[in-house]
Image: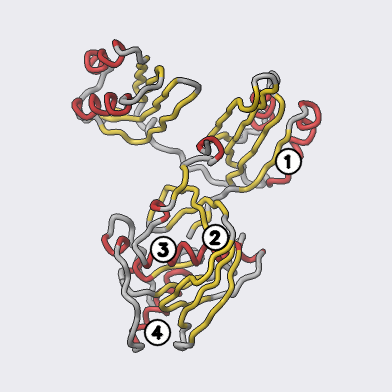
């Protein structure tokens, strides 16, 4: 068990484009374990991306099954994703997001409603899954971290969108 | 460090933000929270500012003079110590959309239902839209629900208002997804 500190902006790791994992070694399994431990320790947040614990490789973990919102919807439980890639996006939804690395601030972000995502799982097996709802949003949010994007880069309006659309 | 609330409003035109913030920068003020927007034809700025040395409003008067001369209204309020700190508001955040044919009392009646139950409104926007001969009033309220209060409770408080005022009201949770 290794719970890591979740980095806060302006830590530079949060703005880096992360490197894909090309050679699978034990550091990958350790990183996945650390990410899961850190996620659970942080009041069971719904996901953590590697750069948030200062490892700039393309790895995230997501688990919405413990959250109030996520457990009401269909989900895949714990997802350990190495080199994840969104290969299809469908629909659009506006959600208010917050992030452990940017405390005390939230913003409305436009996300795809449904996605198809491809990744290598914890056993280095290629997986392709469909995700929707909260799980899809969480995956999109965590994957953004791998490209150095924070939700702040995606905010479409600080308040309601209604009055800005002219 | 003294904190102030600064409110500036005047006919909208290009350059207001630049002029105001230029003066604040020259004075050595920090801008903490701020919200600026066009309301009607007026640009309005509300800022919480601080200054390490300046303690009274007199010190600002001269610096703000050019703004007032250009037609902007400037109002400065000194905050009591701690007045700059955001309270820790816990609870589910809900958005209440209210819209319908314009008539007197829409804002008050909805706000009253919330106020008498000690529900804290944290954001409120209203706008008059639609045709001149058929104006539609739109109001968006963000409120924090006290522990034990559910979205369905808010819906039930609004149900009779909806019928009585012939407006549409919908309530939904917008509690941020903590990711």
Could you tell me which secondary element the residue under label 2 belongs to? loop
Q: Label 1, on which residue?
A: B155
Packing grade of label 2 (10 A; few <14, some 14-19, many >=20) is some
Q: Are marks 1 and 4 in contact (CB under 8 Å)?
A: no
Compute the Cα span from label 3 to label 1. 36 Å
Q: Label 4, on which residue?
A: A29
Which of the marked residues, 2 or 4, is nearer the chain's N terminus? 4
* The one of A159 and A86 positioned closer to us in this rendering: A86
Give the total of numbered labels.
4
Q: Residue at coordinates 23% horizontally, 27% vertically from top-left?
A: B22
Could you tell me which secondary element the residue under label 1 belongs to? helix
Asked whether residue A165 appears in the rendered view, the answer is yes
Protein image colouring: secondary structure
Q: Residue at coordinates 28% horizontally, 30% vertically from top-left?
A: B50
- Given the image, what chain letter belongs to the residue carrying mark 4? A
For the residues carrying marks 2 and 3, which lies nearer the camera in this image?
Answer: 2
Q: Position of residue A134 (x, y in %)?
A: 58, 62
Compute the Cα span from label 3 to label 4. 22 Å
> In the rendered view, does A153 fall on the left or right side of A10?
right
Q: Does residue A27 lie above or below A46 as drawn?
A: below
For the residues beneath circles 3 and 1, the answer to whether they share a chain is no
Which of the marked residues, 2 or 3, is nearer the chain's N terminus? 2
For the residues beneath circles 2 and 4, the answer to whether they share a chain is yes
Q: Does residue A158 lie above or below A5 as drawn?
A: above
Q: Label 3, on which residue?
A: A144
Q: Label 2, on which residue?
A: A112
Asked whether residue A37 appears in the rendered view, the answer is no
For the residues carrying marks 3 and 1, which lies nearer the camera in this image?
Answer: 3
For the residues carrying marks 3 and 4, which lies nearer the camera in this image?
Answer: 3
Packing grade of label 1 (10 A; few <14, some 14-19, many >=20) is some
């Amino acid at each position: 068990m290794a719970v890591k500190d979740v980095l806060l902006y302006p830590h530079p790791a949060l703005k880096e484009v992360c490197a894909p994992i090309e050679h699978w070694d034990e550091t990958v399994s350790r990183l996945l374990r650390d990410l899961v431990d850190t996620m659970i320790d942080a009041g069971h947040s719904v996901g953590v991306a590697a750069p948030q614990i200062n490892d700039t490789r393309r790895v995230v973990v997501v688990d919405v099954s413990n959250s109030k919102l996520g457990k009401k919807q269909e989900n895949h439980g714990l997802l350990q994703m190495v080199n994840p890639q969104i290969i299809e996006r469908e629909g659009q939804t506006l959600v208010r997001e917050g992030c452990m690395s940017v405390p005390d601030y939230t913003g409305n972000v436009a996300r795809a409603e449904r996605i198809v995502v491809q990744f290598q799982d914890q056993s280095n097996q290629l997986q392709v899954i469909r995700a929707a709802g909260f799980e899809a949003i969480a995956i999109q949010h965590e994957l953004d971290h791998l490209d150095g994007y924070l939700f702040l880069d995606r905010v479409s309006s600080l308040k309601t969108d209604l009055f800005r659309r002219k | 460090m003294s904190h102030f609330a600064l409110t500036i409003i005047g006919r909208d035109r290009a350059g207001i933000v630049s002029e105001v913030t230029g003066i604040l920068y020259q004075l050595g003020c920090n801008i903490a929270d701020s919200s600026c927007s066009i309301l009607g034809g007026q640009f309005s700025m509300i800022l919480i500012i601080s200054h390490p040395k300046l303690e009274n409003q007199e010190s600002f008067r001269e610096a703000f003079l050019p703004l007032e001369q250009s037609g902007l209204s400037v109002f400065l309020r000194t905050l009591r110590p701690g007045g700059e700190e955001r309270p820790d508001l816990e609870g589910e955040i809900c958005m209440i959309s209210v819209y319908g044919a314009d008539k007197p009392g829409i804002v008050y009646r909805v706000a009253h239902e919330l106020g008498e139950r000690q529900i804290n409104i944290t954001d409120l926007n209203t706008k008059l839209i639609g045709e001149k001969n058929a104006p539609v009033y739109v109001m968006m309220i963000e409120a924090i629900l006290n522990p034990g209060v559910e979205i369905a409770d808010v819906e039930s408080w609004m149900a009779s208002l909806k019928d009585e005022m012939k407006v549409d009201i919908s309530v939904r949770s917008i509690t941020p997804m903590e990711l």
